[in-house]
Image (tube, grey):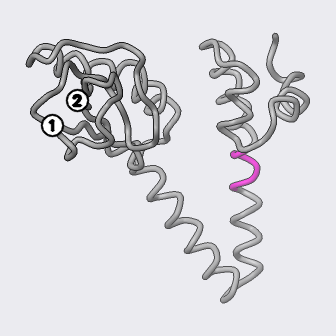
Amino acid sequence: MTFTCPDIPDHEGFAAPVLPSGEPAPSASAFTKTFIGYQAVCSCGWSDRRRFPATPQGAGETEYRWWSRHAAPLVAAAPPGELVTKSNLLCERIVTLAAERPLAALTLLSQVESWQRILLDHAVAGARESGASWAQIGEAMGISKQSAHERFRAQVSS
């Protein structure tokens, strides 16, 4: 049984059978008839420490653990797929516009930049208010925690 979420495409969780040696089976397809329980694992390499009985309820608990311990924080940090698609489309269209009508592209990009800065400040403030650390903010932006703090500390209290 595998668990997937479209907002985190590179993650596929499954209830890995725990072998008598105590190690989880390397994949869901590596099922063996002799196993002693289940452990939640993900295709990205994440695995839960907790092990569950070799019962249908144990398999269900592994799915819950994958969702609550691993997938939920990733989903919380992942932008909605529809917005990623629209953002990518906008980027492609602006590249085309810049090649065909560079002054029009500059006008549009100037407008985008003005509201992007305001939205970025609001998003950082919201992340801090919800308890995100500077390291988490920096990671989400692809910069260091120090860079995030230096860039936004004046706009965001604490």
Q: Which residue: 42% across, 28% down?
A: 47
Name the spot of residue 147 as percent of width and height, x first: 87, 35
The answer to which of 148 and 92 lies nearer the viewer is 148
Q: Are marks 1 and 2 in contact (CB under 8 Å)?
A: yes
Mark 2 nearby-residue class (10 Å; few <14, some 14–19, many ≥20): many
The answer to which of 102 and 128 lies nearer the viewer is 128
Q: Which residue: 78% across, 41% down?
A: 143
Q: Which residue: 86% across, 22% down?
A: 153
In this figure, which residue is indicated by the disc labeled 2? 17
Name the spot of residue 42 as percent of width and height, x first: 37, 37
SS for callout 1: loop
- Which residue lies most toward the front here? 21
Corner quadrant of residue 141: top right
In this figure, which residue is indicated by the disc labeled 1? 32
Is residue 126 positioned above or below 123 on the image?
Answer: above
What segment is highlighted magenta in the picture? 112-116
